[in-house]
Amino acid sequence: MVSRFFANVRNHSEIKLRILRRFLTPWAAKLGSIAKNSSGVIWYVDGFAGPGRYDDGTDGSPLIGLQMAQAIKNRDRGYQLANLFVENNLKNWKSLERLSAAFRVNGVTANNLRGKFADLIPEISEITAGSPLLLFVDPFGISPIKYQQFKTLLNREWPIDVILNFSHRAVYRLATNHPHLITEAIGSENWRREWALTDDPELRAKYVLEEFRQNMIRDGRFHNVLYYPIRPTITAAPRYYLVFASRHYDAFELWNDEIAQEEISLSAKQYSTLLLQASFLPEFDNDNRGVNLLNEISSFTTSLKGFTRRDIVRHLVEHRWGQYHTRDIKKAVGSLVESGKIKRLHVGGQGVGTDEMTPA
Ligand SMILES: C[S@@+](CC[C@H](N)C(=O)[O-])C[C@H]1O[C@@H](n2cnc3c(N)ncnc32)[C@H](O)[C@@H]1O
């Protein structure tokens, strides 16, 4: 199965790549403008890079980094996105070398390290020291993530954001005969006690993920670490979880919109498959989503004396992550102002996001 992995990009792989590509642009813009005044470099580190491109021609995660680096170079923004790819398999590593060479001649930085991600962490830390980094961790299974080594990278002094593919199916496979590999991957073994208390696979996956999350928050000094189940339909069992970690709220706002968009298309797909009424029912679902959103905003704002639209967006991103696109939250606030349920008191110079508001 593993050797056929790169034959074509499956739907569920596409999602992680889409999220990575969409996040890289605003991440690079934001961190790049900060790096301009220091090292002038931001790093994209792909810890389990693969060959760079799928056999069906789809861009793999390394090509996404290389293309972004080229686009930034062409725009001459005063900083560069440098790429660092790690790959254990010789054939894949050679493929990365070939792809990188084509970008290097245009002045893009691309380093390919051959070996195991966990063993190469000291080298990765040294190469990227002094600059922000976005780390993409996409192994087969979970055992190549060795938490004792991994945490030294999470703990770095400079900014770090992480997108990680967590295979809970690998956890199921390892739990009986190789539980120490799970412990080594997530950094502690409390999961074993809770695992024994239930046989619900979803709960078991949650215990392991939650423990991994807490370890990452502590060692990476993250604002938060959140995870999202990648699944083909809204009710299907997850294929894997994407884990997101950042020290800054802003990253969660960007990821929130990607996840909300995925959820909207999953429920639209669900309705059209079940009832073959693609045009009507997704709107019906959107109406429900809209009503829920208005209720959520009202219950948050009624207890407050004053707030801004930005406070409302942040509240929903922090407490209902991935449920509502920020574009829809802003629209909902607008309609509550129009209908007189929220009063816009002070129209300031900074724009509608920061204008003082109160409940009516
Ligand atoms: C899921 S694939 C990566 C796919 C890639 N992110 C993409 O979407 O284009 C995982 C890759 O990690 C490599 N690999 C396996 N164990 C590794 C290790 N310990 N360190 C680094 N790479 C490893 C495999 O050879 C494989 O190419």
Image (cartoon, rainbow, N blue to C red):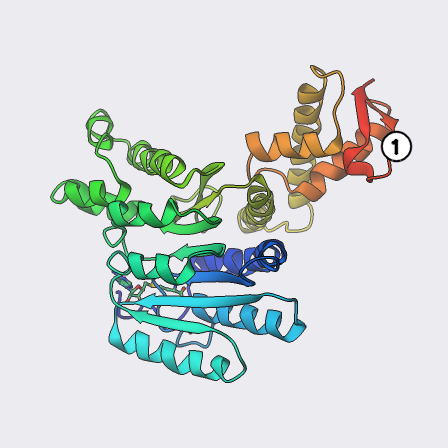
Category of crowding for the residue at label 1, using alpha-carbon neighbours closer than 10 angstroms: few (below 14), some (14–19), many (at least 20): few
The answer to whether residue 32 is above or below residue 254 is below
Ligand 1 closer than 8 Å to label 1 CB:
no
Question: Which residue occupies the foreground of this view, 163 or 11?
Answer: 163
Ligand 1 placement by image quarter: bottom left
* Position in image of residue 69 (x %, y %): 54, 70
Question: Which residue occupies the foreground of this view, 35 or 216?
Answer: 35
* Residue drawn at (59%, 65%) of the image: 79
- 176 lies left or right of 317: left
Residue at which label 1 appears: 347
* Type of the residue with mark 1: Val
Quick one: which residue is furthest to the left in this view?
177
Question: Which residue occupies the foreground of this view, 352 or 78?
Answer: 78
**Figure quadrant of the C terminus:** top right
* Residue drawn at (36%, 73%) of the image: 51
Report how many numbered discs are placed on residues in the image: 1
The answer to whether residue 262 is above or below residue 352 is below
Please say whether residue 47 is visible from this viewpoint: no
Describe the element under mark 1 as helix, strand or loop: loop
- 255 lies left or right of 50: right
Q: Please identify the quarter of the rendering in which residue 190 is found.
A: top left
* Position in image of residue 345 (x %, y %): 87, 24
**Figure quadrant of the N terminus:** bottom left
* Position in image of residue 41 (x %, y %): 53, 63
* Position in image of residue 241 (x %, y %): 39, 46
Quick one: which residue is furthest to the front in this view?
38
Please say whether residue 353 is visible from this viewpoint: yes
